[in-house]
């Protein structure tokens, strides 16, 4: 995650744009290897039920620091249409984390 709050929101925007384009491998690569959630193939398969998938990324929070990491919260609304034509919408907050240049951290 870039070191600015807006940089973090830009990464999230890229993540959702990749999903919208169907590039699930590239979207998966932006996730943390230790992130909770489905395995890579299950992640890609989870989008089969959508005919359209879009996201609106909001303004990020200020950067918070704790235990050698930087955190930014970004509101996101996802919306679109299911394969059966029914619309869907959901809103929530995504928390992005970046290691704060502690010993053993890498640029990733």
Image (tube, grey):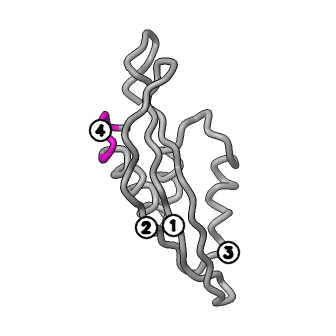
In space, the residues marked 3 and 2 are separated at their CA atoms by: 20 Å
Determine crowd level at label 1: few under 14, some 14-19, many 20+ residues with C-alpha closer than 10 A.
some
Disc with the residue nearer the chain's start (4 vs 3): 4
Count every numbered label the image shows and give the total.
4
* Front: mark 1 or 3: 1
Q: CA distance from mark 1 to mark 3?
A: 18 Å
Read off the residue under disc 3. 49
Q: Nearer the viewer, mark 4 or mark 3?
A: 4
In this view, the residue farthest toward the top is 103
Helix, strand or loop for the magenta stretch, by majority: loop
**Element carrying mark 3:** loop
Q: State the image coordinates of residue 62 (x, y, percent, origin top left).
A: 37, 40
Instruction: Indicate which disc, 3 or 2, sits on the residue closer to the N terminus.
Output: 3
Q: Secondary structure at mark 1?
A: strand
Instruction: Report the mark closest to the observer, 3 or 2.
Output: 2
Residue situated in front as seen by the camera: 56 or 84: 56
Check residue 98 for magenta coloring: no
Q: Which residues are magenta?
A: 2-6
The residue to which callout 1 is attached is 77
Secondary structure type for disc 4: loop
Q: Which residue is mark 2?
A: 56
Q: Residues within 10 Å of mark 3 (few under 14, many from 20)?
A: few
């Amino acid at each position: 995650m870039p070191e600015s709050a807006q940089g973090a929101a830009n990464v999230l925007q890229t993540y959702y744009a990749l999903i919208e384009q169907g590039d699930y491998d590239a979207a998966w690569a932006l996730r943390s290897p230790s992130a909770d959630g489905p395995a890579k193939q299950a992640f890609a398969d989870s989008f089969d039920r959508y005919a359209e998938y879009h996201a609106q990324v909001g303004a990020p929070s200020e950067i918070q620091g704790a235990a050698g990491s930087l955190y930014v919260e970004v509101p996101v609304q996802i919306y679109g249409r299911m394969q059966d034509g029914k619309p869907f919408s959901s809103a929530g907050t995504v928390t992005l984390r970046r290691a704060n240049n502690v010993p053993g951290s890498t640029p990733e």
